[in-house]
Amino acid sequence: MSHTQSGYIRAGGARLEFTWTGPGPDSAPTLVFLHEGLGCVSTWRDFPERVASRTGFGALVYSRQGYGKSDPVTLPRATDFMNYEACTVLPELLREAGVRRYVLVGHSDGASIALIFAAAGVPAIEGLQGLCLEAPHAFVEDVTVQSIAAIGDAFRNGGLRKRLRRHHGSNVDGAFLGWNQVWLDPLFRDWNIVDLLKDITVPIHIVQGRDDEYGTLAQVAAIKRGVAGPCDSTVLDGCGHSPHRDQAETVLEVIAHFVETYSDGLVGESL
């Protein structure tokens, strides 16, 4: 894979859009960005490129099926969709992309997928160096369900659909409804990955906004209690559910410090 490109890669039986910025996997470790429930490649904006430039790592960003320019997804999503993404799609994508040493940078649903992946011990995990997580979910909170229900009104009656269409194009309805409906499914209220956390030994850093409308500090506490490896956190005042947009410079430095601490001096070395 070349040092800078965009295109499509097949994983999980679907064609997924991706962008790659910075050095390839033979030259440096890779930051793999996992987007939120309404995100995709373009919603990260220039943040991955900035982190790649700051750290010397490559940055692989992709849109899950049903998002951005990736293949559409059949609805409704199964309530175990995050397990499927973590245990089937992500390992295939890493292999197809040639990723060898890497840090997962996950946001919201993407952060939960990263946790499940790290706990599952799938073959691709051998190169995993750590997790940088923004606003992760380890269980379902009332505030999450209430906020997701409320945003449904903004999608149906406000301007949210138009704004999301700029990122998801013809996938816009599938992207929103696939996320909104599964989180509001009564069967999903019992979703909980706390018992899996004990199997995670890689280092973790969590960034959580104190004003996050989709989750509370209880998520951070549960993860820090549950994992077997080192886990630190940064709680940001005046910050909502998207720290890399609300306080980009701070989050960039948090990630840079994390990878510099745990990268084992691999930047710039032949892997």
Image (tube, grey):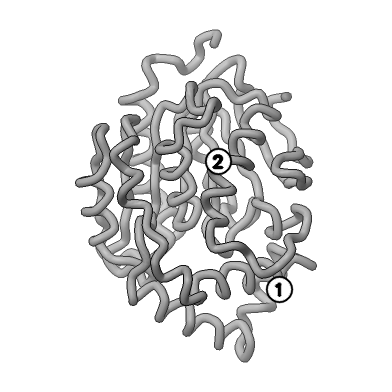
Q: Residue at x 29, y 58 (%)?
A: 219
Residue 51: image x %, image y %? 49, 38
Is residue 119 left or right of 175 when viewed as pictured? left
In front of the other: 138 or 40: 138
Say which quarter of the image contains residue 78. bottom right
Q: Is residue 259 visible?
A: yes
Left or right: residue 267 versus residue 99 is left
Above/below status of 206 relative to 242:
above
Residue 132 or residue 2, whichever sits in front: 132
> Would residue 56 be visible to someone looking at this image?
no
Q: Please state which amino acid type lies under the numbered disc 1.
A: Asp
Q: Earlier in the sequence, mark 1 or mark 2?
A: 2
Q: Quadrant of the N terminus?
A: top right
What residue is at 49 percent from the left and 28 percent from the top? 125
Q: Which mark is residue 173?
A: 1
Q: Residue at x 74, y 65 (%)?
A: 171
**The label number, if any, that marks residue 87 in the structure image:** 2
Q: Residue 77 location in percent, x, y?
A: 63, 64
Q: Is disc 1 surrounded by few (<14), some (14 to 19) or many (20+) residues within 10 Å? A: some
> Within the image, what quadrant is residue 5 found in?
top right
On-image quarter of the C terminus: top right
Report the amino acid beneath label 2: Cys
Q: Nearer the viewer, residue 187 or 37?
A: 187
Residue visible at 65% across and 51% down in the picture: 64
Residue 207 numbered mark, or none: none
